Image (cartoon, rainbow, N blue to C red):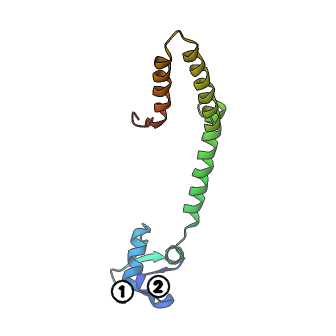
Amino acid sequence: MEQWTIAQFCREVGGDRKEFATKVSAAKIKPCGKATGRAAGAYLYRVRDLVKVMLGGDHEAEKLRKTREEADRLAIANARARGELVEIAAVKKLGEKFMVALRQRILAMPLTDEEKDRCLGEIVGLKDVDWNAGS
């Protein structure tokens, strides 16, 4: 297992040492020791970790992302099977059926035409309500 300082790595592959050091820090790569000799005190990193940072990818991070995505997909499927999630189209269809039934009930009531119009007008006004405001 070969270990290099950031400066050694940048000399070998090219690139700005300070910029690359920032990327290594952002990637939270931990040093595996300190250099001796001419570069005494500089942190040593595994070359494979430095290459991962240089290429901008991390196989483990990608694997974790895919695992989380699969877990989310499974959680949604389980919630749907338990009846905790409902398709939007089903909710809209039920809402439309409810509104038709409500309209028919209002029209069948012994009210004046003006009262019926006012009730139906208030119901039509519900489409402008922000139903997420209470959340």
Instruction: Give the residue at the far front of this rendering.
Output: 113
Q: Tell me if mark 1 has few (under 14), some (14-19) or many (20+) residues whose alpha carbon lies within 10 angstroms of its own.
A: few
Position of residue 124 measured from the top left corner of the image (x, y, whole percent): 50, 30
- Residue 73's place in the image compared with 44, above or below, is above
Query: From the viewer's perspective, is the residue at label 1 or at label 2 nearer?
Result: 2
**Quick check: 121 left or right of 37?**
right
Q: Which mark is residue 9?
A: 2
Q: Residue at x 45, y 75 (%)?
A: 45
Real-space CA distance between mark 1 and mark 2, rounded to the nearest whole angstrom? 13 Å
Q: Residue at x 57, y 21 (%)?
A: 103
- Residue 20's place in the image compared with 57, above or below, is below
The amino acid marked with disc number 2 is Phe
- Residue 21's place in the image compared with 103, above or below, is below
Q: Which residue is mark 1?
A: 39
Q: Residue at x 46, y 17 (%)?
A: 115
Q: Quadrant of the C terminus?
A: top left
Position of residue 42 measured from the top left corner of the image (x, y, whole percent): 35, 80
Whichever of labels 1 and 2 marks the residue nearer the N terminus, that label is 2
Q: Is label 2 in a helix, a strand or a loop?
A: helix
Asked if one can make out residue 35 in the rendered structure from this viewpoint, the answer is no
